[in-house]
Image (spheres, helix red, strand yellow):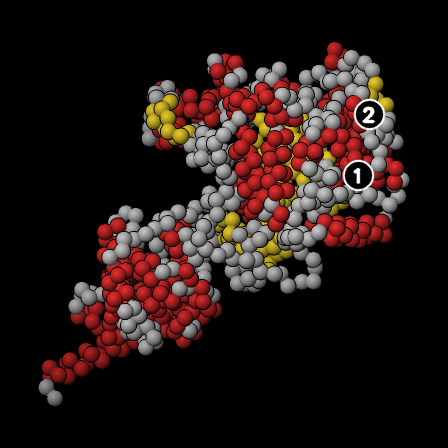
Amino acid sequence: MSGTVRFFWRWFFYGFIAFILIVLLAALGVFGSMPSLKKLENPSILSATEVYADDGTLMGKYYVDKGNRSNVKYKDISPHLVDALVSTEDERFYDHSGIDFKSTLRAIVLLGREGGGSTISQQLAKALLDHEGRNKAFRVIQKLKEWIIAVKLERNFTKAEIIALYLNAVPFGGNMYGIRNASLTFFQKEPDRLKVEEAAMLVGMLKGNTLYNPLRNPKASLDRRNVVLNQMVKNNKLNSIEATLLKVQPIKLNFKRLDENNGYAPYFREQLREELKSILKDLKKSNGDKYNLYDDGLKIFTTINPRMQEYAEEAMAEWMPTMQKVLNATGNIKNGKVWKGFENVLEAAIKQSDRWRNMEDEGFSDEEIRASFNQKTKMKVFAWNANREKDTTMTPLDSIKYHRQMMQASFMAMDPVTGEVKAWVGGINFKTYKYDHVNIKTKRQVGSSIKPLLYTQAMEERGFSEETICTREAQFFEGKGWVPSQKNCKGGTISMAGALAHSDNCASAYVMKAVGPESFAEFITRIGIPTNIGPHPSNALGACDLSLYEMLWSYTMFAGRGFTTRPWYISRIEDRNGNVIKRFDYIVNRKEVISEATAYRMVNMMQGTVDRGTAAGLRSRLGASEMGGKTGTTNENSDAWFLGYTPQLMAGVWVGCDDRFVRLNKNNSAGYGGYAALPIWEKFYAKVYADRKLGIERDAKFSQPAELNTTIHNTDFTELIDKLPPPGAEGEDQGAGSEADFNVLKNTEYIGPESKPLIEDGKQKPPKKDTSSSTTILTNSPKIGDPVKEVEKTRSKRLKNLLDKKRKNN
């Protein structure tokens, strides 16, 4: 053997040994950690957390960076997609064991001119490693690691599972990962419903998701799609005639970008996000790690009803443009004098704006930045139209004034017995206004809406009844002065039923005098409301600040037969594999605070409001058999409220401006709770009643306690209510006003709900049943179509069990 041959074999042998050694060192993690077998079995491809409604509708997602993924199983992937992928990316996928040496050798010899040599398994391995080579030596090591992982994948997964893992991992550009997100974004359909040409387009993007993006480069994307179709013909996955017909067709998209603002109930999902962060702090995986909201692929099942959510947003959009027109016609709004004396508010808004921060970062002086706020510029601003925005030209300062002069509103609906939140609208437009007015931390002066709570305590603890005579005189409280102002009380008497129906301030002061400010503050705490309202006599008129969330919480004791139930909205949380990691039960949120008899009598009394009082005619207009409610107004029309309920549903509305000095004229009747807030509530209920699938019945009735004399149920308080002279004090509810006054201002354009389905042409994922525990989980509304009799029977049974348990403990 010649010296040259010996030299060749010696170096070949040394090279082979070195190669084996490098492979072993790579497998041992010397060149960086390698995924363990356990990790390969459960690959940590980031997955977005998904939020579902009570009927399984996908409401939205939480993700950051590469977390915008929604994993699918192989059975949920179109066969066209699998055929296109294998034909284009790895023709011998079903024949190799992770490494295609023939393709690898071809890529080396031809320097990649006819495609690379990486198999689908290797590409998946690269995604799992999640790093690019920084130099040639590093890339060689990375390639070896990909080979090792590819072989491990082939040994531990079926070919179908590898394809599913791969399609769940690949990027499609624009922070979009996984075939499901790509399918939903470009075609608004699930990946199992993709047509051949659609599947080919998406597979074509894998070679370069920017270069072959159909929006940015439609011609290149079309050419690449046709290359994929040719590959399918070559591999006998598509006949040539069909391919020819498909190749002449243009790319037809139904594009809708997925982001966290898309979907149902954006204000609610933001509130839910914050609560989930707190909940997940106490939950750990089997390995002891904490769950991550943004990349662990959790599934959050909520109590929100999509239909009710849409109806709530529609109702708000139908009425608020009218209220905005009324506000815009107010004198000090038209002439700009509303800002006189409040320049500090504008100054704070200027310095908190993106414009100020961005210019400050770029090195502009304060004087230069301030000057820019007085220069007119083109911009988009919020507007009450179908797009909820309009193009205009104005100064940035005027833009701040414009947006702060926009009237806000909030709405929440819930089951008054179980506490399940069914709809949550925190403001008029989440894209523009992120501040949530339903949130328990967002408190506003409640006005007369607090009076039912005061009257409840008087009835429960002071022996008051519907017929108790109350004097209509200002009351003097030691160290606190007169409540209300003496000039606003004209004297005389009125029954408590009449005082509540017509929201009489003077009579409410009389009731507060009997109950005591300290005792009333303690009562509010005792019924479960966390905010301390303090021992102030003016609380009889609603001078305290509470949230819409808390007000509805307190009102649950009426329809809840003496129990308050904290509103709740999460039914269960599942991990990415469908295992329930936490479940929720309404029973822990319930508290018995008054007798069932008092609750029932208050319901009867509050029906006076919606029949003859400040919300007169509401019940008859809606055709409800039984209903209770209360309006609320604060001084100078800064806040308007309406809270109402039927046996199966409760809802509340608040209307006002974020800056309390931006308000309607004091003498404008539209600013009172009976007109500013009530129409939203009424429109919502009309829509709910019309939707028979929701099972909310007009003829539903409150259950009468057995211990009450049957005559109480039949008592007619009409005469008591009608005897009251019209109220006139500031802060009192003036009633519904004149409908004719608003006809010219009413909005006629259909704006529609802010919530939009994430999936317009596809099937929704149904919620899985939680069978992990025998504990009753209330994840849905009463069964659709159940007779009222059965609904009441079920509720009565629940409440009876609770009462028996409570009394047994006592």
Label 1 element class: helix
Taking the spot 57% from the left edge, 39% from the top edge, the residue there is 312
Taking the spot 80% from the left edge, 20% from the top edge, the residue there is 723
- Above or below 265: residue 298: below
Which of the image's four quarters has the N terminus? bottom left
Taking the spot 36% from the left edge, 64% from the top edge, the residue there is 81
- Above or below 141: residue 659: above
**Percent position (x, y) of residue 275?**
58, 46
Label 2 element class: helix
- Graded by Cα atoms within 10 Å as few (under 14), some (14 to 19) or many (20 or more), the crowding at tag 1 reads many
- From the viewer's side, name the closer residue of 373 and 502: 502
- From the viewer's side, name the closer residue of 110 and 178: 178
Label of residue 719 in the image: 2
**Percent position (x, y) of residue 209?**
30, 54
- Graded by Cα atoms within 10 Å as few (under 14), some (14 to 19) or many (20 or more), the crowding at tag 2 reads few
Taking the spot 27% from the left edge, 69% from the top edge, the residue there is 239
Is residue 607 found left or right of 271 in the rendered image?
A: right
Q: Within the image, what quadrant is residue 580 found in?
A: bottom right
Q: Within the image, what quadrant is residue 56 found in?
A: bottom right
Q: Amino acid at mark 1?
A: Ala
* Mark 2 or 1, closer to the camera: 2
- Above or below 327: residue 685: below
- From the viewer's side, name the closer residue of 262 and 305: 305
Using the rendered image of the protein, determine whether residue 775 is visible from the camera's viewpoint.
yes
**Percent position (x, y) of residue 8?**
15, 80
Q: First in sequence: mark 2 or mark 1? A: 1
What residue is shown with label 1? 599
- From the viewer's side, name the closer residue of 507 and 683: 683
Is residue 747 found left or right of 98 in the rendered image?
A: right
Q: Amino acid at mark 2?
A: Glu
Q: Residue farthest to the top?
A: 487
Number of dots carrying numbers: 2
